[in-house]
Structures are given as structure tokens and as C-alpha cells.
Amino acid sequence: MTAAETPDETTVTPGDRPADVAVETIQREMTAFARRARASAGRMHPELSLVSYTLLGHLEERGGCRATDLATHYALDKSTVSRQVSALERTDLVERRVDPDDHRVQVLHLTETGRRILAQVTDSRRTAFRERLADWPEEDLLRFAAYLERYNAWQGAGAAPAAENGK
């Protein structure tokens, strides 16, 4: 099977505009990036999936939040977030605390174990990124970072509002 015949590649025909070819390349490469990120997450810490890592990072960044806030921020179903949070609670990475301003509300916070593991995985991920990008010129790194920020800031259909995604 040739590279063009693999299931996740799109065949580009001669005469396609360079922008069309670029969009197909971006889609293919972002898919490969996501697959690699999911696969490496398990190697960084066996109990911490990429989704769990992302949720823990958000909780740390926000100083805690409600499960419904996580669902809204990541555009996930509440039941999906509930399952993820339950798994994080079972492994003592997250705990629920009563909101001091509204005793009816429970806020999710990292436990000390959660903070420690998140820090370890973050350091490992940072090291892996630095190794992979070590020979990139600074100008390329700055441009790449700006492009990723621009891409992720898009507020199109289905995107979380800027106020909810930290912008």
C-alpha cells in the first residue's frame, strides 16, 4: 500500500490549488499530531490519558472549577466529563470541595497527588517538545507558536466563546 492509499491521507490531484493542498496537509499532519499526543500520554504516566492531563491542566490554571464548566469549555457532554472526573477522583488526582460562595455547588480541585503528577507529566512533555524542536530556528518557533494560537483562537461554529476558553 502506498502512502497515498493509507486511510488517513487524501489524494491531491494535479491542478488542485496550492491552498487546497496545504489544507489537506494541515489536516493530515494535525491528525498525526493528535495520535502521537494520545500515544505519548500513556508513556508519560500510565493512569493519565491525554484527556485527563488536559482536564487537570485546566483545573490548575483556573484554581478549580465545576464539572459543568469543564464540559462547556471543552464542548463535551456532561456525562463524558462526569466519567472522566470520577476516574480522576478514584485515582486521588481530583477532589470536590463545596464552593464557599454557594454551598449548593461543588468545585473540582487538584489534590496534592494531582499537582505532583501533573507537574511531572508537564515537565516530561515540555522536555519532549524541546527535544523535537531543538534544531528549529527561533524565528520558526515564534511563527509556529503564533500560528497555533491563531488557529486555536478561531470562534467558528461550535467553538467555545472566548470568555470561556481563557481568551
Image (tube, rainbow, N blue to C red):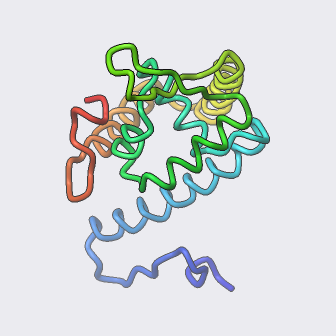
Above or below residue 55? Residue 20 is below
Above or below residue 159? Residue 18 is below
> Residue 72 or 57: which is nearer the viewer?
72
Image x and y of residue 120, in percent = 71, 22
Indicate the quadrant containing the N terminus: top left, top right, bottom left or bottom right: bottom right
**The image quarter in which residue 148 lies:** top left
Indicate the quadrant containing the C terminus: top left, top right, bottom left or bottom right: top left
**The image quarter in which residue 124 lies:** top right
Identified at 57% across, 59% down, the residue is: 32
Image x and y of residue 88, in percent = 65, 37
In the displayed structure, does residue 82 sit left or right of residue 126?
A: left
> Residue 103 or 80: which is nearer the viewer?
103
In the displayed structure, does residue 163 sit left or right of residue 46?
A: left
Image x and y of residue 50, in percent = 61, 44
Above or below residue 6? Residue 135 is above
Identified at 39% across, 29% down, the residue is: 105
In the displayed structure, does residue 28 sit left or right of residue 143?
A: right
**The image quarter in which residue 63 lies:** top left
In the displayed structure, does residue 64 sit left or right of residue 84?
A: left
